[in-house]
């Protein structure tokens, strides 16, 4: 950022700024790196900074086992998945996933654990779990004899 969008000033200073976000009836707060306009005090946070903040909120919700409608909606949004795709990955009907986000039906522990894994992999920029869930939709035929590559002992 070279110029304040609000006042067009070029006097932007790097600062640590407290940012808060309300999710599921909790206020989450963190000091985040930002660029602050010296003239109008408008704060600018980079996209990765905001994404990491949201991931931190998601982990706080997951560690608490928060599974109310707002928490589930937020957690799904953090995975970057649309409702329909999310339901398809989890092997539930879109109406079922939609009910979770409306507080009209509880998510089971196994599904919640998969959701946690999807969030964790989002942070690590991995898609192993999503890829595996997608692969379950088109199972491969396993031949009668399967030659395995040797694995190192742990
Ligand atoms: Zn400004």
Image (cartoon, grey):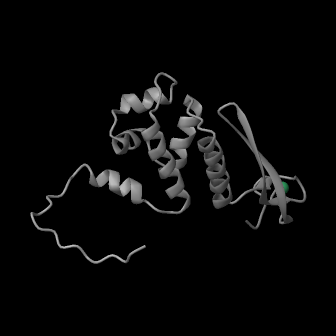
Please tell me which residue is depicted at 64% across the width and 60% down the height of the picture: 48
| Residue 66 x %, y % | 60, 35
**Residue occupying the far top of the picture:** 104
Q: Position of residue 47 (x, y in %)?
A: 64, 58
Describe residue 39's horizontal placement relative to residue 137 as left or right.
right
- Residue drawn at x 20%, y 53% is 139
Counting from the top left corner in percent of width and height, residue 1 is at: 73, 65
Q: Is residue 56 left or right of residue 36?
A: left
110 lies above or below 139:
above
Q: Quadrant of residue 51?
A: bottom right
Q: Quadrant holding ligand 1?
A: bottom right
Which image quarter: residue 92?
top left
Q: Nearer the viewer, residue 59 or 24?
A: 59
Q: Going by the picture, which residue comes out furthest to the left?
A: 144
Instruction: Please name whichever residue, 34 or 133, is drawn nearer the observer in this view of the structure.
Output: 133
Q: Is residue 84 above or below residue 122?
A: above
Q: Quadrant of residue 34?
A: bottom right
23 or 149, nearer to the observer: 149
Q: Residue at x 44, y 46 (%)?
A: 114
- Please name the residue shown 52% across and 24% down the image: 103
Q: Residue furthest front?
A: 153
């Amino acid at each position: 950022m070279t110029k304040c969008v609000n006042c067009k000033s070029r006097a932007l200073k790097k600062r640590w700024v407290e940012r808060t976000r309300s999710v599921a009836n909790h206020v989450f707060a963190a000091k985040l790196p930002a660029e602050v306009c010296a003239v109008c005090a408008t704060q600018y946070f980079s996209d990765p900074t905001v994404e990491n903040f949201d991931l931190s909120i998601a982990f706080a919700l997951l560690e608490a086992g928060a599974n109310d409608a707002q928490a589930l909606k937020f957690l799904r949004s953090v995975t970057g998945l649309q409702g329909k795709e999310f339901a398809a990955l989890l092997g539930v009907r879109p109406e079922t996933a939609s009910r979770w986000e409306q507080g009209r039906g509880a998510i089971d522990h196994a599904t919640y654990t998969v959701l946690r894994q999807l969030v964790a992999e989002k942070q690590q920029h991995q898609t192993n779990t999503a890829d595996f869930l997608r692969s379950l939709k088109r199972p491969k035929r396993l031949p009668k004899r399967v030659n395995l590559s040797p694995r190192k002992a742990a």
